[in-house]
Amino acid sequence: MDATSSSTKAYIIAVIIQLIYTGAPLVSKVAFNDGLSTSVFVFYRQAAGSVVLLPLALFLQSNTLCLNMYNLSLKFTSPTVASATNNSMPVLTFCLALLLRMEVVKPRSSSGVAKLAGIALCLGGVLVIAFYAGPAVSPVNHHRAFSPRPGPGHHVMNASSRATWIKGTLLFLIGNLAWSLSIVWQAALLKEYPNRMLVAVAICVFSAAQSFVIAVVAERDLSRWKLQLDISLLAIAYTGFLVSGVTYYLQAWCIEMKGPVFFGVWTPLCFVFTMFCSSLLGEVIHLGSILGGTLLAGGLYSVLWGKSKECTDKIALDGEVNTIAGSHQDEQMREGTSVSLVDQEQSPKV
C-alpha cells in the first residue's frame, strides 16, 4: 500500500469514526427516555464490547465512572451537549498531564500561549453551555424523538429545568475528567507494560464487572434488566459493538498511521453531525449549546496547535544541535588531519 493510498484511507476512516460516534448519544438518549436504566445500560454496553474485544483484541480506552456519568448527564441534557462537551476531553487530558508533569507549558512561547488560550476557551465553552441557553433554533423535524415516555417505574426528569441542565453539564465534565484520567493512567501503564492488547481487554472486562456491581446496587427491580426488541436493545448493540468495538479499532489504526494530533482534529466533526441529526429528529437546539460547542472546538484546536508547534520547534532545535555537533566534529577532523601533516613534515627523513 503506497503512502498516498494510506493517507486517503486515514481521512476516510477519521470521518467514519465521527459518524459512528454521532449515533451513540442519539440512540442512547431515545432509549433513556423510553425507560432504559443508565446503570444497566452501561453494564450491557461493556459486556457487548467485551464480546467484540476478547476475540479480536481491539484497542479500547474505557472507564466505568466516565460511562456512568456520561449516560446520567445525557439523560439530563441533550445529544448536542454530549457531543459538544466531548471536545473538552483532549484539553482535560492535557491539563492532567500538566499537573502530573508529563507536559510542559512555556508561557512566553507561542506554543505555550496557544495551550493556555485553549484551556481558557474550553472553560468558557463549558460555562456557556451550563449557564446560557439563549434563543431556541427551530428543528427541521417538529416530531420530537427525544420526548420522554412515562411508564411504570420510570421517573421523567425535566430536562428543560435550568438546575437539571446545569447538573447534567457538570456531570459531563466530571465524566470527561474521569475519561481523561484513564487515558493518562493508561499511557503511564503502557510504558511499563507495552502490551496494548492485554491492557485493552483487561480494562473492558473489569469495567463490565464494575458496571454490573453498580447496576445491581442502583437497579434492584429485575424488570428493568429485561431486554426486548426495542430502542433499548438497539442502543446497547450500537454503543457496545460499534462504539466500544469497531470504532476503537479504527481509532487505533488511524492514530498509528497519522498520530494522535491528526485524530483529535476531527473530534468537532461529531458535534456538527450530532447537531444536524438532532435537528432532523426534532431536538430543540439552543444558541448557548452552539456557542459553547464552538468555544470548546476552538479550545481543542488551540491546544492541538500549541502541541504541534512545540513538537515542530523541538525537531528544529534538535536539527540545529545535530548540525552544530556535526560541524564541530568535521572541524576537529580537519584540525587532526592538519596536525598529522605537520608532524610528517617535521619528522627526520632517513
Image (tube, rainbow, N blue to C red):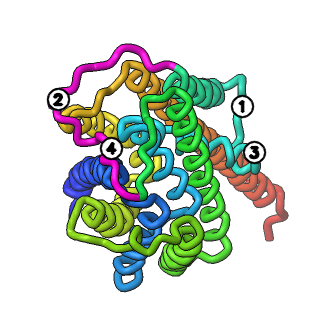
Q: Earlier in the sequence, mark 4 or mark 2?
A: 2
Report crowding for label 1: few under 14, some 14 to 19, many 20 or more residues within 10 A (C-alpha): few
Q: Position of residue 136 (x, y in %)?
A: 32, 18
Badge 4 is on which residue? 148
Q: Earlier in the sequence, mark 1 or mark 4?
A: 1
Tell whether label 3 touches label 1 (CB within 8 Å). no
Vertical comparison of 44 with 181: above or below: below
Vertical comparison of 177 with 163: above or below: below
Circle number at residue 99: 3
Badge 2 is on which residue? 142
Nearer the camera: disc 4 or disc 2: 4
Q: Position of residue 282 (x, y in %)?
A: 22, 33
Q: Amino acid at mark 2?
A: His
Q: Label 2 vs label 1: CA separation?
A: 50 Å
Specify whether residue 149 is painted magenta: yes
Q: Label 1 vs label 4: CA separation?
A: 49 Å
**32 relative position to 278: left or right:** right
The single residue placed furthest to the top in the displayed view is: 135
Badge 1 is on which residue? 106
Q: Earlier in the sequence, mark 3 or mark 4?
A: 3
Front in this rendered view, residue 240 or 223: 223
Q: Earlier in the sequence, mark 3 or mark 2?
A: 3
Q: Label 4 vs label 2: CA separation?
A: 15 Å
Tell me the element at label 4.
loop
Nearer the camera: disc 1 or disc 4: 4
**313 relative position to 52: left or right:** right
Name the residue: 23% across, 32% down.
Answer: 279
Which span of residues is magenta-colored?
Answer: 132-152
